[in-house]
Amino acid sequence: MSVTVRCYPKNVLTLLRVVGSRALSTETSTEAQKTYGGLKDSDRIFNNLYGRHDWHLKGSMARGDWHKTKEILLKGHEWILDEIKKSGLRGRGGAGFPSGLKWSFMNRPPDGRPKYLVVNADEGEPGTCKDREIMRHEPHKLVEGCLVAGRSMGARAAYIYIRGEFYNESINMQTAIKEAYSAGLIGKNACGSGYDFDVFMHRGAGAYICGEEMALIESLEGKQGKPRMKPPFPADVGVFGCPTTVANVETVAVAPTICRRGSSWFSSFGRKRNEGTKLFCISGHVNRPCTVEEEMSIPLKELIEWHAGGVRGGWDNLQAVIPGGSSTPMLPKHVCDDVAMDFDGLVAAKSGLGTAAVIVMDKTADVIKCIARLIDFYEHESCGQCTPCREGTGWMAKIMNRFVEGNAKPGEIDMIEELSRQIEGHTICALGDGAAWPVQGLIRHFRSEIESRMEQFHAQQEGKQQQQQAVA
């Protein structure tokens, strides 16, 4: 065997290094210089998000739904998975796990058990209002998405687990499922592809914990909504003991459009590792609360200014923003000025994209009281299975409510932070983490506000005692 060794002159090696470094720096600078946002209407996946058009089958097909679905199915599960992987789609329910990789876990040698797709339509995260808009105004996108995603996994059926309070949404979804069956789009020989696929809808009872995939599976099976230990993971032992993938409504609904328009189209939006478009829910102290589809990596300030009409009283009146639903740590104004709304940008800012539910608080908001209210919510919604969460959320709620009045000592700030660290990562599911992070974000950015509240409270108490002594 011969080995060829190329020897370059020193000046050539130097030139190669310079050219390589310039190419790398050019790529980095191009990424940094590119601007994000301003999504064109022609690039929007959800064209009836506000319910201005017909949501039934005829209207949905006129907007492009169910177009070439048979061709997509006939291309096979490997092609669909490859497109989803190349698109860079990451889960839109909060975790942000690569969807193509997650769905591929189902492709194992058959063992006689049927496979299932379970769609998490519970949407119980405070501040989140995107999935309900899809189910209310674009239900056929979800039904078609179930078929395409199910084909990629070799699933026999899809179960849409919808939150019990979503009455109107459940009616529209059931109507869309019935229309799809009547048109031969799902069921036996779906779309004439030779693939059999059923879609069922199951209504939950409104428990927040059932948004966690294992608790959702337990509830779907008719048991108490309490998370199971993992492993085994759902892809091994899921609903009814069969291989299962649990996916978010938005994640599933965008799959057909990605397959139709191509993975390169979807991946052209957003920064690397944060590709695609995303539904953002903007609420709180803004002039026009809304749910809007935008490009990933859009700056938070531009998202609020362009689509929500800006902060009430102007941008300078902003105090803090919870960027991804109630379980993500809040960010103060100076961070919000230039943070990008994507997975990596918000992790770098010590927060998270979560469900992309942007909750805006201006300077009139009592941030301590806001976080105390969230902790009350998490205490109420804890299933009680794990001791750190069951006991810890109650302790945090008591301390936070005393912080609202200022009836505490400065040392208790570090105490509650340590308590949150003991809850975080020590529970079966992520509810404990979601309860701990808002407290950590408050302390990280607004410790001085908490200390000031305590000083005011103790000053008032001393004043009252002096008055009582003077009277006596």
Image (cartoon, rainbow, N blue to C red):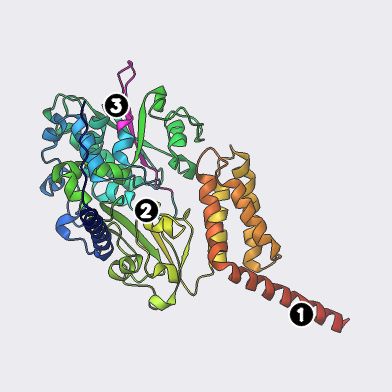
**445 relative to 327, above or below:** below
Q: Earlier in the sequence, mark 1 or mark 2?
A: 2
Q: Kindly tell me whether residue 249 is visible in this rendering.
A: yes
SS under mark 3: loop
Query: Residue 203: image x %, image y %?
Result: 38, 38
| Residue at x 29% of width, y 26% of height | 107
Residue behind mark 3: 107
SS under mark 2: helix
Residue behind mark 1: 463
| Residue at x 64% of width, y 45% of height | 391
Q: Earlier in the sequence, mark 3 or mark 1?
A: 3
Decide whether the magenta segment is chiefly helix, strand or loop. loop
Q: Quadrant of the C terminus?
A: bottom right
Circles 1 and 2: CB atoms closer than 8 Å: no
Report the side of 468 relative to 45 (left or right).
right
Bin the neighbour count of mark 2 within 10 Å (Cα to Cα): few under 14, some 14-19, many 20 and up.
many
- The circle drawn on residue 343 is 2
| Residue at x 48% of width, y 53% of height | 327
Report the side of 173 relative to 265 (left or right).
right
Q: Give the magenta range.
A: 104-124
Q: Earlier in the sequence, mark 2 or mark 3?
A: 3
The residue type indicated by label 1 comes to Gly
Cα–Cα span, label 2 and label 3: 27 Å
Is residue 229 inside the magenta stretch?
Answer: no
The residue type indicated by label 3 comes to Asn
